[in-house]
Amino acid sequence: MNFFSKSYKDFLNESLAEYYMQKLCLKSNKTKLQKKIHSCITLDSDKGPKEIFKTLKWEFKTTTFKASDITYRNIERLSALIYQSNNSGIKRDEYELVINDFLSLSSNSLSVNDWDKLGFICNANGLFKLSGLFRKKETDFVIERYKKKRTIKSLIAMFRVYLDLGNYEQAEKVIEQIKSKNSSNYVSNLYTSFYNYQNNKNTHSDNIKNTFSELIKNKKIAVVAPGLVEIDESVVNDINSYDLIILFNYKGNKMDERFSLPFISYYNSEGGVILKDSFKNFSNDLAFSVFKKISQPYQHELNNKGRAKQVDRDLNEYFFVPQPNLLQIVLDDILIYSPQKIKVFGSNFYLNKNKYYKGYIYSGRSEEKSSDMWRAFAYHNILSQINYVRNMYNINAIELDKACFDAINMSEDELLDTYESIYSNFK
């Protein structure tokens, strides 16, 4: 259950409440900070970088800059890169200089929140290698703090790092420590909703979940992501050999008429709202529907009829750098229902520009630009998405088609280089 849906008075530990209030503010600040930066990129080449620098300097004004660590010169160079990326193009020599500047800094040069903020800003402006570097600094900061001090804050952060690394046994040990140290509702919910994918002991009690379980348990599931754009006969035969297809944001336009299986669809928050007036036109195509959030009248009606449910838990609480995409939410939601086999088709993590099958994007949307992917990578950290799927594959929880398999077997440097070659703006 999401902490932010609960009242703060439920907390018995004020320092923990303060920590999560800071996280809430950080999320807002990252978005507001990017909006301020974005307002500067249309200024002329003399004024624009200076205004970005003033914005970032103000943002980090409370940070103690040590002579041997991060300096305003580092921030000034970063500001110039952000402006270049959004205008004439990134100068490679200056980019490498900034990477080396930050690479030489220790992880405790900034707080975990500040590393996170810098990573968000760099992704939002097409500087993916820098964002990856800041993500690594953030992880190292958490690990070092965990070694020195086992506070609730450091334990929760380390719990998420272990999940990001795919070390579920250690994550389970840490969540046990957290539960023994703190009795707040947030910790109780975090503990109750956690499950070790390698040692699943979850059961389902309500009728809707039992109905869904009958569709999934001991079945072979083909998770067909919207990136499946080239569908030859061998792919069709492979998918049709399963018991059930799971689609994303289905809205009546079938991906391929040759698929003969019953299917269900998962919907993100946007899809659930956009389809509120048209869902009835194709709802009978679906054996079941799963929504990230149930808020619309038609969703409640489907839920009351036993034909839909909300995802069982907020996976965001179990991601080191949020937010999970729909693929990760789908896998998390079905794995606890003990399917016999899961195979993912059609997800190559945006490693080419042919991202979606025809008809997937909602009508009325303008053609996507590279800067749209920058924002997507900022709000849905791409390394977190890939790590999750890689971890599931490494524990034999899922199988992957070739495109997805190739993606998870790329190193972090290879991935970030490829993303920059496709989406970044270099001179």
Image (cartoon, rainbow, N blue to C red):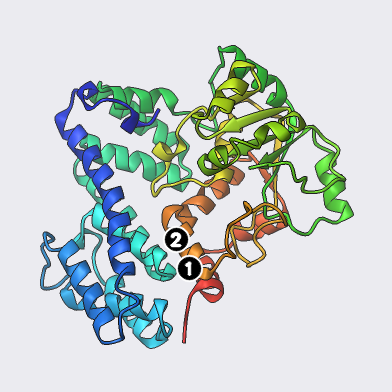
Secondary element type, mark 1:
helix
Judge left or right: residue 51 versus residue 394. left
Give the structural element (helix, strand or loop) at label 2. helix
Q: Is residue 393 left or right of residue 40?
A: right
At label 1, counting other C-alpha atoms closer than 10 Å, the crowd grade (few under 14, some 14-19, many 20 or more) is: some
Q: How many marks?
A: 2
Name the residue that disc number 2 marks.
Answer: 375
Q: Give 147 or 48, whichever is nearer the viewer.
A: 48
- Amino acid type at mark 2: Arg
At 31% from the left edge and 86% from the top edge, which residue is drawn?
45
Q: Position of residue 8 (x, y in %)?
A: 22, 27
Q: Is residue 385 visible?
A: yes
Neighbor class of circle 2 (other Cα within 10 Å; few <14, some 14-19, many 20+) is: some
Which quadrant of the figure has residue 261?
Answer: top right
Position in image of residue 100 (x %, y %): 32, 77
Residue 208 in which image quadrant: top right
Q: Is residue 226 above or below residue 14?
A: below
- The residue under the point 30% across, 68% down is 37
Residue shown at 11% from the left, 68% from the top = 66
324 sits left or right of 309 in the view:
left
Q: Nearer the viewer, residue 277 or 198?
A: 277
Residue at mark 1 to residue at mark 2: CA–CA distance: 6 Å
Residue tagged 1: 371
Q: Amino acid at mark 1?
A: Ser
How far across and how far down the image is residue 20, in percent?
Answer: 25, 38
Counting from the top left corner in percent of width and height, residue 356 is at 67, 57
Among all residues in the image, which is located at the extreme front?
277
